[in-house]
Image (cartoon, helix red, strand yellow):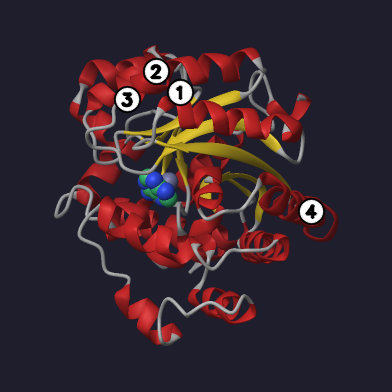
Amino acid sequence: ASLKRFIEMVPKAELHVHVEGALEPELMLALAARNGLPPPYPSVEAARAAYHFADLQSFLDLYYAGCGVLRAEKDFYDLAMAYFRRAAADRVVHAEVFFDPQTHLGNGLGWEVFMPGLARAAEDAAAQLGLSAAYIVCFRKEMSAASANDTLSGALPWLGRGHVIGVGLDSSELGNPPAKFADVFDRAARLGLQRVAHAGEEGPPEYVWEALRVLHVRRVDHGVHSLEDGALMAALNASRTPLTVCPLSNLKLKVYEGQLEARLTQLVGSGLVVTVNSDDAAYFGGYAVANYGYLAAAAGLGVAQVARLAANSFEASFFLGPGSGGEA
Ligand code: ADE
Ligand code: ZN
């Protein structure tokens, strides 16, 4: 019981959360109604019942479909504020939040629709909830390098504190190794942006090596498949490159099916800078506290180890980390 209380109360930074993945079915249906769109599901219960995934792609298909209800600036404000309120209730005091501009641009929206809504939510989260927030633009890995480059151009008016502090890579991993994005990541570096990438979620350790060596990322999102390469684990350890691990996401997307608890135990014991995150809480069934709780039970952690994970989240953040995006 005291471990549960500690997990609830310890201040945390959340570093791997997609704002679109915080779209709870209640808000999804409300936004569909507000925007005069057909509801993606007949009811909240039907949506939740549909959230059973065989792998990453089967999740992404529903996640992108859900994004279709986001049409107006206020939709993005409401979505982000709902996440910030929920995160603050879990004692998240700092969040670096991914979003997928290409998805919204593909739905016919411009930056002037989604970005002011997201930015105003970050300002209100700081003022009303004491939660500092910044955004990381994700490029979708199955899309072209040219599209990623155009997306970065679109972000240029929005760089800086409370707005966009970095770039990342997300979406379909297998068959889409990171090196395709070398040039756009170089450009992001020259702009003073932080770089992260989803790698080693479903894909092999080679994709993590590429993210490190070609994209020069400062954090690896997921990275759980690094466990299969001892030299990679040693390199991540030596450079103190953090992994943003998302335990309930790995569970629901059947990463390491049958062996997940053993793999998570190994990761936490590895000495790497492991952090705990919710990824897409509305789809995977839990925010920060639920992810810490699941991991603590799966890996048999006590208070001291949970405290270490929470401390790691601040070390790994761009709020305090070297070359802090907070200066941007
Ligand atoms: N987009 C949202 N969640 C994601 C995940 N877990 N992996 C890749 N892309 C994502
Ligand atoms: Zn993710």
Q: Is residue 58 left or right of residue 307?
A: left
Mark 2: amino acid: Leu
Residue in front for this viewpoint, 257 or 139: 139
Gap in Å between the C-alphas at discs 3 and 4? 34 Å
Gap in Å between the C-alphas at discs 2 and 4? 33 Å
Asked if residue 283 is positioned above or below residue 176 in the image, the reply reads below
List the residue tagged with mark 4.
Answer: 120
Indicate if the residue with disc 3 has its beta carbon within 8 Å of ligand 1: no
N-term-proximal mark, 2 vs 4: 4
In the rendered image, which quarter is residue 238 located in? Answer: top left
Q: Nearer the viewer, mark 1 or mark 3?
A: 3
Residue drawn where x is 59% and y is 38% of the image: 136
User: Visible in this render: residue 196?
Assistant: no
Gap in Å between the C-alphas at discs 4 and 1? 31 Å
Mark 4: amino acid: Arg
N-term-proximal mark, 4 vs 1: 4
**For the residues bearing labels 2 and 1, Cβ distance under 8 angstroms:** yes
Residue drawn where x is 14% and y is 55% of the image: 258
Residue drawn where x is 28% and y is 25% of the image: 207
List the residue tagged with mark 2.
Answer: 212
Q: Residue 257: x, y in percent?
A: 16, 53
- The residue carrying pointer 3 sits among few (fewer than 14), some (14 to 19) or many (20 or more) residues within 10 Å by Cα, namely many
**For the residues bearing labels 2 and 4, Cβ distance under 8 angstroms:** no
Q: Nearer the viewer, mark 3 or mark 4?
A: 4
Mark 3: amino acid: Val
List the residue tagged with mark 3.
Answer: 208
Residue drawn where x is 64% and y is 34% of the image: 154
N-term-proximal mark, 3 vs 4: 4
Q: Nearer the viewer, mark 2 or mark 1?
A: 2
In the rendered image, which quarter is residue 273 located in? Answer: top left
